[in-house]
Amino acid sequence: MANKDIFQPQWIKEAPVKGSYRSIFKYGDPKGFKHPNDMLFQELKEKFKLTEDDFREKETTGNEIVDISIESKLSVAQIDKFIEICGKENVSSKEYDRLKFSSGKTVEESMKLRRNKIGLISDLAVHPRNKAEISEIVKYCNKEIIPIYVYSGGSSVNFGYYPEKGGITLVISTHLNKIVKLNELNQTVTVEAGMMGPAFEEALNNSPKLYGSKHKFTCGHFPQSFEYSTVGGWFVTLGSGQQSSYYGDAGDLVLGVEMISPSGNIITKEYPATATGPKVLDIIKGSEGIFGIVVELTWKIYRHQPENRQYFSFIFPNWDAAVNATREISQGEFGMPAVFRISDAEETHHGLKLYGIENTVYDKLMILKGFKPMERCLFLGTADGEKQFTKNIKSNVKKICKKHGAMNLTSFPVKKWEPGRYKDPYLREDLMDYGIVIDTLETGVSWDNLHQVHQQCRDFVKSRPDTICLTHASHFYEQGTNLYFIFIIKENDIKAYIDFQEGLLDKIQKSGGSLSHHHGVGRMIAKWMPEHLGENQMNVLRSLKQHFDPNNIMNPGKQLIGG
Amino acid sequence: MANKDIFQPQWIKEAPVKGSYRSIFKYGDPKGFKHPNDMLFQELKEKFKLTEDDFREKETTGNEIVDISIESKLSVAQIDKFIEICGKENVSSKEYDRLKFSSGKTVEESMKLRRNKIGLISDLAVHPRNKAEISEIVKYCNKEIIPIYVYSGGSSVNFGYYPEKGGITLVISTHLNKIVKLNELNQTVTVEAGMMGPAFEEALNNSPKLYGSKHKFTCGHFPQSFEYSTVGGWFVTLGSGQQSSYYGDAGDLVLGVEMISPSGNIITKEYPATATGPKVLDIIKGSEGIFGIVVELTWKIYRHQPENRQYFSFIFPNWDAAVNATREISQGEFGMPAVFRISDAEETHHGLKLYGIENTVYDKLMILKGFKPMERCLFLGTADGEKQFTKNIKSNVKKICKKHGAMNLTSFPVKKWEPGRYKDPYLREDLMDYGIVIDTLETGVSWDNLHQVHQQCRDFVKSRPDTICLTHASHFYEQGTNLYFIFIIKENDIKAYIDFQEGLLDKIQKSGGSLSHHHGVGRMIAKWMPEHLGENQMNVLRSLKQHFDPNNIMNPGKQLIGG
């Protein structure tokens, strides 16, 4: 998209230096990039009052080699034990490996690693080959009181892997990444927890060839981190995909699990429904490794029928109209769209740039019809399912959008959005090279507090001078939706950044939103949990923790902080 | 329906004698009856080799006055305390009341009460007026170690109220039976736990008048016990309604609860979704009062649009074809029917009689087209939702049924079934007056073990001579369904009856079904739980019990038996 006549910074176009900090914090494919386009770049310059000169030299790159020496606190005998269990090639005490598998993809980690600052790192990276080895490791660690963290896809945005109390990190995506069995009759697939999104989906799409099934299948779960997250991670963090309004959230998509915990192994049975409550499967949902390690899951699958997919996009005169229309759609009982997202005025402004719609005939028509920049709001949607079902969704959506004053933008914008939907996180590295931070926080809201949460959080973000705040709602339910805040700031000071982020979390909580809609809790959000849930609910979770993991070796220092 | 020329027994047509055992065990409206019609009566006579003479005198009626004297084990001071909290008029130590509120609607209880045999009864019946009183009672009972049982709708079929360890029974349907607020924006209603089904649904249907809402609403939950069960009961026992395939099971329909427990009160927040797991709301689902008392619930509501409802019925050549078709419908991704049920060959045989279809033009046409009695299987369905959505479901259902060899029976049979759908339990009293027992057990199954569970359970039931066994599947999911077994036997011996029932529960478990799809666990099924869940899962539940209720005063002796 870059116009050769316009100045553009020298965005880094090479994979990070091998063994560097950047190779650890860079999101996704080492050779994957999404550079800011001209329009975005111009806008950032204006917003942050920067000149071209500010983009001639990078502030940080993190391309320095990780050259640190931090002794493992494990004894030689302990390390030998892990080697005995998993084989020499699956155990590493190298500092680089230990740092890598202790790091997620938070902005804070990135800011620090760019400055070659590191926090705690685990004492050993271990790549178990199967669940029997994990079981043996958990038993051994429980005896020796060695904490265990689990690393799978690597895209945690809340310090999910942070080794608060030292110990070992199990990298389960290295070996536990296969489909165990596909059951076409039940429409389920049993899969090892460390299988990555793309391999999982590809196998399901090709199931007639691979498993002799009659139908092709889809997993239905496509978070932005799809390419760098795993089936087990989706489940234990209560993730949601970009088509969740139709397929359900990760917690809804799992029929059974196998979990290995210090207090014993749990295998839940795969009934489509059972009234033998309370259900231990439900208790494991969202447990983020603090009770045990989910090693295998039975996942609900759906028919893969892209030929039936319908696409639609609309522009609304304002946010109120967009919210009212999506509420009416969500409560309309004609089935839910799959992709289903509305952007507020500021995000729409940027979205039209990012998806290449600004200055097209669509944009001109919008202006002509009175849809004003910084007021108008974009709606993108698709429908999955049976042919007439998807057509009927589209026809109802059209009717409702029209009623709320929207203009039909056809399928063009959503089709522009779709191919790049996993790529937005790649913008981060380019911007941070020049001291610009792009980050996100998100919350679950009811219809009746959506506007309050949106407004108060925006007000907070905007109280910081020169801050971009983009918001969308992208997971819909009859009772409400989520709000996903993207903020872009010029900030070099790590402490100032953290203060800002914590301020927004505070505001989310105080304005009535859930602390997290689908990013999970981890270490980052843990300190808000007691106020969020109240002491009595915290005590329920603590009692479960005490039961599953009396020695507090499972991912200590996360949801329950000390516990 | 009775033909005056044909002999019919003198079915009881009057309400039970006031103060009698019958007034306790009779299901439903004291003046509500559904007498066996001629065809059913003839069939029973033949099956059980009975003559008209066997129906001239009733074996038991239970119409004897409850005249027992069982001292309450509570002290005068304790009783005074409950009077102080709830008012004199809301506390009863009368034996009749204590027996009534300790009794559910199991066949075993009915067999015993008919013979004036009673088990344990609670020491006091208390009708709290609000949740503050319940809170005070729980605190007091926890201090004094007085067990608490909760009675609401009264239709438990697993000894849910049985006062295993003495103590008090809280009757929460007496006062806690109102809607607290209706939130049209969120499409939720907050309701006290003891509100009965019909009052709840009527208020929702009339919400424009009562709450000034724009739309009429429905609760979407219509179990067979609808008229004698409560919103709180639906939730804590993980119930399912007859339209659950569309609206979801009770566990899916609740967004938030307030629960009072010895370890403190829990109020979960009402997010449509949140990734701050594990969720205490999920832990309370199906807890059947062993952790605490659910006093208030926020329930998801749906648009009440009977004008859009579609009705359809089909006859299949056999059970395999019916199962294959319903699986294809469930996995077809065009939306789920609301009422969705298939009857196996034996139930179809009876259903056609019961719904008045035998000997109609439909029956003749079926025979003509080769749908053989005792092979053919009936499918009844409706679709709820938006107009085109329901039409599209019907059109897809038609196509799939035809493909599987079914004949369209139009809406006639399902419309015959619908008005009487809460009335079948009333048959029980008439039959038991003459020593004939009709009872049910049910299970959740996956598609891949449905036939095995069905066949093995039928084989077991049929291994008892002269036994009628009717089976239907009536709650559908992409991954499976339920099997609901109705068995009719001639049996006067209580022990023999229990042995038979336990044998069937054993068979359900051994053949791979869930111990309960929607009846819950209670005391009856508890002893199968350890094998069902395994020791490790039982220990998770025990640790929760220990946390919520360290003195084991909340509904002791149920799911966790001793615990």
Image: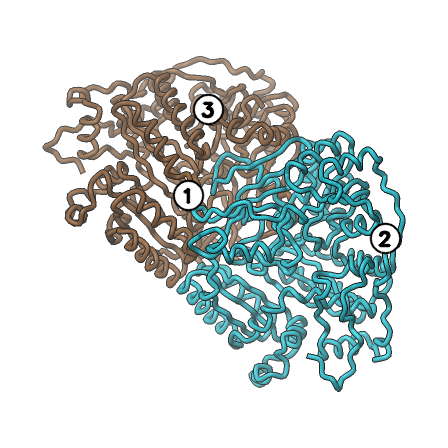
Chain colours: A brown, B cyan
Q: Of the residues shown, which amino acid type is indicated by label 2?
A: Ile
- In this rendered view, identify the residue nearer to me: A471 or B95: B95
**Residue A121 image point, x, y percent:** 47, 19
**Residue A190 at least partly seen:** no
Quadrant of res B339 = bottom right
Quadrant of res A111 = top left
Q: Quadrant of the C terminus of chain A?
A: top right
Residue that label 1 marks: A447
Query: How far separated are the C-alphas under marks 3 and 2?
Result: 64 Å
Same-chain check, marks 1 and 3: yes
Task: Give the chain letter at badge 3.
Answer: A
Query: Tag 1's secondary structure?
Result: loop
Residue that label 2 marks: B118
Q: Going by the picture, which residue comes out furthest to the front?
A: B88
Task: Give the chain letter at badge 2.
Answer: B
Query: Tag 2's secondary structure?
Result: loop
Are there few (<14), some (14-19), or many (20+) residues within 10 Å of tag 2?
A: some
Q: Of the residues shown, which amino acid type is indicated by label 3?
A: Ser
Tag shown at residue A102: 3
